[in-house]
Structure formats: C-alpha cells, structure tokens
Amino acid sequence: MPRGFFTTCTTVLFDTLPSLDAIEAALGDFTIRARRAADEESWFGGFDELVIDYRPAIRGFVTVERIDRTWPDTMGDPKHDEDTFGAWSMGAFGPGAFPGNLARAAQQAVSWTDDPNEAVARHRGMIRLRGSYVMGAGEDAVVLPEDADVVDELNFVARLAEKLTALPGAIAYFNPSAELLLQPEELSRRLADANEREVPPLDTFVHVRLMNVAEASGWSLMDTVGADQVFLPDHEAVLDRDQDPNEIAAFLMNLAYYLLQRGEVIEDGDTIDGPGGVWRAKLCEEPLVSPPRRTLRWSLNGVRVPDVFEV
C-alpha cells in the first residue's frame, strides 16, 4: 500500500469544526513553527494549517490541518474523484490506509459506549495530523531518516490529538492506518496508562478486531491492524468457540509489543506458548481480511483449522 511522504497520519473528527485560532490555543504547549491560511484546498493539502516542531534537527515536523470536509472513506475513484484517489495513491491519508477504513473502525469500536456509527455519521469536519521529514527539503531528502523513531512520533502525534479532542465539537480520535476509532476520554485513558507504565502507547496505533467467519461455523478470526506503521507485520489468530477472545486479544497485543521491542524476529513456523497451548506462526504476505498488509497467522499447534484459514 502507498506510504508517500508522510510517516504518520491521524485525525480528530468534529461535528462543529473549531477555528484555527482555537486549534492554535489548544496546542500552546507545543512549538508552532508556522501558520498558513487556506489556499487551493485539495486532499493533497492547501487547508488552514499549523506546522509543529517535532524533531526540527532532522526536519521532523507535524502538520495540523483544519479540514471542513468529512472523511473520504472510499479513498476516491480515478474516473469520478481524481483528487481524492490521487491523494490516497500518494499516501496522503496515512501509511497503509485502505478504502472503507472508517466504516470498519466503527464496526470494530468495541470500547465505544454508545453507537459509533451514529458518531461517524454526525461528523462534519476534521483536523488531520501528519508527520513528515521532507517539508521544504530538497529533492534528495530522505522520507525516513536513519535516526527517525516512528514509535516516538506516533506517541507525539497522539498527544497532539489528545489536546485537540478537548476542543468543543470533538467526536473521536481516528487513526486510519490502524482502523482505530476512540472516544476522547478513551484516548486519554490509554495515553495515561502507557505513561504510567512507561511503555509506548501501542493501543493508540494498533487495534485488535474479532470477526466471525461464515464459511467456518464455530470458528472466528482475531487480528491486529496498524503494525505496518512501524514496518512490522500484524497478527492474525484462528480460534474456535472454546477459546476466550479476551485471552487471545491480550496474546496478540503481547506479540505486537514483543516485535515492537525486539524487531521482526518471529519467522514462518516458529512456535510460542499462549492461551490453551502452543501456537504456530505462518508468515503471510496477504491477510484474510482487509486492509492489505503482511501478517503472522497463528493457530494452535497440531489443531486442524478449516480450509478458509489456510489461504
């Protein structure tokens, strides 16, 4: 999937969009390098914008765009919506973003306290935050410098987003690459928990989903989305009705933390102890469910799973 020139992308959805002055005031704890008025708006850019210092020594900045549009969940069409499609093909909506990501995020928003679909339908605009190391640089600029830390950048952008969710009209934090939709208070809770435990806020940029599989009665698929943002495979687990989904979710997030700390050290056929026994990994270049990405597909060692999971 396209990565483009932006290393991170997340949004805050609003039913009433705040002014650029209000956005600037909300981010007063951060260094604002530039402020730009809207000019020839398109999904490539040109909206009202602030530029925030992240790591200026290596040209690391975050753009904060005030966008008076709803999220383009179809990601456009080359014949009928060339602007949106072109922006998507250049990675303007985040690394690995894929059509239908907001709809799937709402469907899988298990922490939401009421109806996430109603909240999504209510949004009328957004603030888009994107990290980049090439703004204003020459043609030889490197999209991701050697000493860049994408995990730290995701943490930084999530904390910018947290400030913005305190503004009137804020509905949700939405990370399109993780297909993750959170209410403002849930984003704050997860960031505070990570800070207290002194670990990266993984659950603000990696999301666990559970899906029933019609072709395999009594079996389910659980997966993670978002690890591609940090150049790692996501995880899929094949489980039957006797396995506790909460235990499997914790298992997958622990695996995601493990790769975050150790790198891509799990290979095809490797095994690991987990809920109910020993699990075996299968390295897959394509997942069972959108969005497209590499995965490690896990199943209990020695257990015959339905053919639908062997794709």
Image (cartoon, helix red, strand yellow):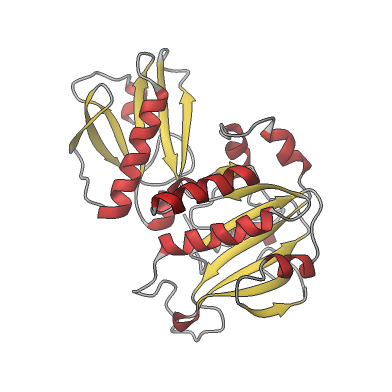
**Residue drawn 67% across and 35% down?**
116
The image position of residue 234, as x and y in percent, is: 37, 44
**Residue drawn 31% across and 35% down?**
297
The quadrant in which residue 229 appears is bottom left
Could you tell whether 93 is left or right of 242 in the image? right
User: Which residue in the rendered view is the most extreme toward the bottom?
Assistant: 138
Could you tell whether 154 is left or right of 50 in the image? left
The quadrant in which residue 127 appears is bottom right
Could you tell whether 116 is left or right of 108 in the image? right
The image position of residue 145, as x and y in percent, is: 39, 75
**In the rendered picture of this protein, how many numbered marks are placed on residues?**
0
The image position of residue 248, as x and y in percent, is: 36, 28
Asked if residue 3 can be seen in this view, the reply is no
Along the line of sight, the residue nearer the viewer: 219 or 275? 275
- Taking 208 as reference, is 246 above or below it? above
**Residue drawn 78% across and 53% down?**
168
Along the line of sight, the residue nearer the viewer: 32 or 189? 189
The quadrant in which residue 41 appears is bottom right
**Residue drawn 61% across and 57% down?**
161
Asked if residue 190 can be seen in this view, the reply is yes
The quadrant of the image that shows the C terminus is: top left
The image position of residue 310, as x and y in percent, is: 31, 28
Could you tell whether 135 is left or right of 113 in the image? left
